[in-house]
Amino acid sequence: MDIFNALTLLGGLSLFLFGMAIMGQALERRAGGRLRTLLEKLTAGRLAGLLTGLGVTAVIQSSSATTVMVVGFVNSGLISLKQAINIIMGANIGTTVTAWVLSLAGIDSGSLFIRLLKPSSFTPVLAFIGIVLYLFVKDTKKKDTGMILLGFATLMFGMESMSGAVSGLGDVPAFQQLFVLFKNPVLGVLAGAVLTAIIQSSSASVGILQALAVTGQVSYGAAIPIVMGQNIGTCVTAMLSSVGANKNAKRAAMVHLSFNTIGTAVWLSAFCLLRALLRPAVLDEAASLLGIAVAHSVFNILCTMLMLPLSGFLERLATALVPDGKQPEVFSELDERLFATPSIALERCQTVAAGMAETAALALNEALETLRGYSRETAAAVREKEAKTDHYEDILGTYLVNLSARQISEADSREAAKLLKMMGDFERIADHAVNLVESAEELRDKKLRLTGAAEEELSVISKAVHDILGLALTAFVRSDLASAAKVEPLEQVIDQLKEQLRTRHILRMQKGGCTMDAGFAWLDLLTDLERTADHCSNIAGCLMDAAHDNLNLHQSLREIRDGSEDFQERYREYTRRYALP
C-alpha cells in the first residue's frame, strides 16, 4: 500500500462519513412530522417504545443520534426514563439497517438484474436525480429528498473508494498479523469500542469494518468481537450529551451504556465458550460484507431479547449509579439537544410559548381585577407574571433564533418566524397589565375616584378586552382559526369604544364632573386597554397569515375587514353586545 492508496483511503473515509452525516440530517428534516407522530405513541407500552426507537433509528441511520434525542427528551420532561429505556433498545436494532444497505456492495453475479442491485450500478443514477432535485427544484421537501440521495451516493462512493484503497492490504503481512491479533476477543472488543468512540457512529464503524473485509483478512472470529465493541463505543456520544443535563437525562445515557456493556459481556462470554468448546470452522473463514451485516443484526437482536425483560433492572441500576440529589428535579423545556430533531424542538417551543401566552393573559385579567378593587397581593402577582413573560421572551427568542440558524424545513422555518412575531405581542400584553396596575395605584395613592358613569364605561370596555384576550389565547394555544377570525371585528369595536369614552370624558371635564388628575389616569387606562386589543389583533392576524402562507399582516387584516360578510356580521353583533350605557 503506497502513499496514493493511503490518500485514497483517507478521502474515501471522509466521503463516507460526510455522506452519512448529510443523509442523516436530510432524513431528519424530511421525516420531522413522522418523528413527532412516533413520539406521541410512546405511552402505548414497552413494545411501542421499542418499535419507536427502531423506526426512528432506521430513518435517521444513527443510534447515537437517536440516543442523544432521547437524552434531550428526558431532560425536557417529554418522556419518562422508563419510556427512554425501550426506545434505546429499539435504536440498537434500527442501527443495523445501514450495514445491510452497505452489504449490497458485496453482490457478485453475472446476472444483469443482480448486478443492477449493486450500489456501483444505481448510485450514479441516484446522485444525478439528487443533484437535479437539489439544484433545480424550489420545493423544500424535494430539495431534502435530493440531499438524501446525494448523501447516500456520497456514502457509497466513499465506501467503494475505501474498499479499493485497502484491497491490496490482503497481501501485507503486518495487516494480516493485525487481524490475527484481533482474534483475541477482548482486544477485538476494545478495538471496536475505541474506533466507534472516535468517530461516534456505530453505523460508520461497521461500514469501515465492511470495507476492510474486502481484503479477505478479516475473519468472523475477529469481526464478531469488533462488532460487539462497537456497541459500547457508540455510548460515548450519549454520555457526552448528558453533561449538564438533569438526573433523569444522565440516567438515560447510563441506561444506554449499561444495556450495551451488559449485553456485550454476556454474549462475549457465550461467544468465547462456544469457540473454546466447539471450535466452529466458520470463525476462521473470511468475513463477507453480508456476513458482517448478519452478525451485527443478530448480536443487537440477542442483546435486546436478553435485556428487554430486564428493563426494570436497568432503570434501578441507572438510578443507583446516578442517585437523587437534595434538589428537586428540574426539566429544561428548551434543550439544545433537541436541535437534532428540529420539528420536536419546535414543538417544545410551541409548548413554552403557550405557557407564556397563558401567563400574559392571566396577568392582564388580574390587572383588570385591581381596577375593580385594588389588592397588594394581586398587584404583586401581576408584576411577577410580567417578569416571567420577560424571561420567556428571552429564552424562547434565543432558542428560536439558534434553531432557525440551522438547516430546517420550510414549514418549520415559517412556524419559528410565527412564534418569534407573536411572543413579542404576549410580552407587551403583560407590560400593559403592569401599566393598568400602576394606574390603579395612582388612583389609590392620590385618593382619586372615577365618576359612576366612568366606572360603568370602564366595566364595558374591560369586558370587551377580557373577551378579545380569551379569543386570542384560544386561537393561539389551539391553533383555532375560527376564534382568530372573531378577534379583528371585536378589536374594531374596542377602538370605537376608546374614542367614544375619550369624548365622554372630555364632556365630563367641561361640565366639572371629573378632575384633571383623574382624567389623566382615565386616559392611561383607555390607552393600555386599546393597545392590548391591538396586540390580540396582531396575534390572530399572524395565525391567519401562517395558515395561508402570507407574511403581510396588514394586507391580511385589510382583506378581512373589507371583503368578509362574516366580519361585518360579527362587528354588528359586538357593537350591540358592548354598547355603552
Image (cartoon, rainbow, N blue to C red):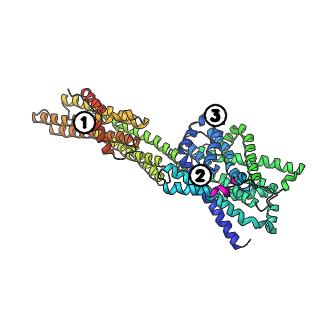
> Was residue 51 drawn as part of the magenta stretch in this picture?
no
The residue nearer to you, when weighing 135 against 564, is 135
Q: Quadrant of the N terminus?
A: bottom right
The local crowd at label 2, few if under 14, some if 14 to 19, many if 20 or more residues have their Cα within 10 Å, is some
Q: Circle 2 sits in a helix, a strand or a loop, which is it?
A: helix
Instruction: Choose top left, top right, bottom left or bottom right for residue 182.
Output: bottom right
- The residue segment tinted magenta is 116-123
Whether residue 328 is visible to the viewer of this picture, yes or no, is no
* Residue at the spot 69% in from the left edge and 56% down from the top edge: 207
The residue nearer to you, when weighing 245 against 35, is 35
In x, y percent, where is residue 183?
82, 58
* Residue at the spot 43% in from the left edge and 47% down from the top edge: 414
- Against 82, residue 146 (above or below) is below
**Numbered label attached to residue 45:** 3
Location of mark 1 (residue)? 444
Whether residue 204 is visible to the viewer of this picture, yes or no, is yes
Determine contact: label 3, label 1, CB under 8 Å: no
Location of mark 2 (residue)? 241
